[in-house]
Image: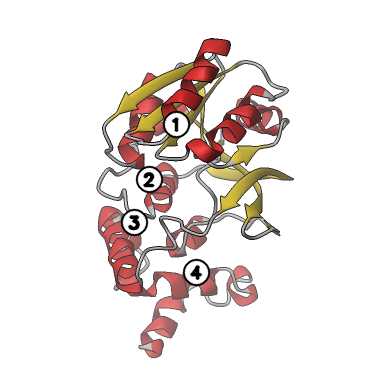
Amino acid sequence: MKISVIIPCFNQGKYLAETLDSVVMQTFSDWECIIINDGSIDNSENVALSYVEKDPRFHYICQKNQGVCIARNRGIAMAQGEYILCLDGDDKISRNFLECMYPILDEEQSVKVVTSTVVQFGKIHRVIPSTDYSLEKLMGRNLFVITSMFRKVDFEKTEGFNENMAKGLEDWDFWLSMLEFGGEVVCAKQAIFYYRIRGYSRNKSISEDYYSLLRKTIYENHKHLFSTVFFNPKYSFEYYLIAKSYEYKLGKLLFRPIRFLYDLF
């Protein structure tokens, strides 16, 4: 088995068939799909089981509501695939998604993560260009969506998705764990991932104060990494702005970011 697609869902029955159809239609066929029902009270189970009955590559887990982190970790633990792709129960991938992503990881051992250009759809329709990766930028903010492919063996070297961050930013926290000790990130330039924008989303509902608390939690989770750059976690986004600047790329600000940020406060 080459690829395991992990789909946690919580009351997303309205959209789940679209998500699962996008997996069924893949031009790359060596995959399995593990659906984790995280205590839904809508028709998610009926939708999921209808696909399990039709295609043996689909597997279904039902658990009491424990949050997306536990659901993903449980699905990945069960996965038989060499490569892992997390996909939320209301998003979609284009029919050539796996075919585009798989060869990059399979041929380049130095690459840890393969991501893609994102198409937002639903309440908003727009294409989100990819951002060139560096660890410094990732320390400032999340750079790519959770629907990016990685090796299961690399996942097992981390502690998985932090189960204390089920309210948000768990993807950013996970990517820091995956990449803090090195590894390349490649972005497939094709716009092949479709991210649904709804009236309500978990991240949009986070208050500014709680968002700050989550950022501080990320800092605490990766203190050994952040302490090499920041003396205060609130500076990390400002550092991201510096890290992507033209002057920084030329090396002119290489030893100046912290002094510059100190002056800001």
Residue 129 placement: quadrant = bottom right
Q: Residues within 10 Å of mark 2 (few under 14, many from 20)?
A: many
Tell me which numbered mark, 3 or 2, is placed earlier along the sequence.
Answer: 2
Give the mark toward the camera: 1 or 4: 1
Q: Residue at x 53, y 74 (%)?
A: 242
Residue at image point 55% right, 39% down: 15
Of the image marks 1 and 3, the number of the one nearer the N terminus? 1
Q: Is residue 157 visible?
A: no
- The quarter of the picture where the N terminus appears is top right
Q: CA distance from mark 1 to mark 2?
A: 31 Å
Residue 119 lies, in percent from the top left, at 67, 51
Q: Which mark is residue 240?
A: 4
Question: In the picture shown, does residue 239 fall above or below 61?
Answer: below
Query: Looking at the image, is mark 3 or mark 4 earlier in the sequence?
Result: 3
Residue designated by label 1: 44
Label 2, secondary structure: give it: helix
Contact between marks 1 and 4 (CB within 8 A): the answer is: no
Image-based side of 26 in relation to 34, left or right = right
Which is closer to the viewer, label 1 or label 2?
1
What's the distance in space between the residues labelled 1 and 3, CA to CA? 40 Å
Task: Provide residue 107's location: percent of width, then percent of height.
Answer: 65, 27
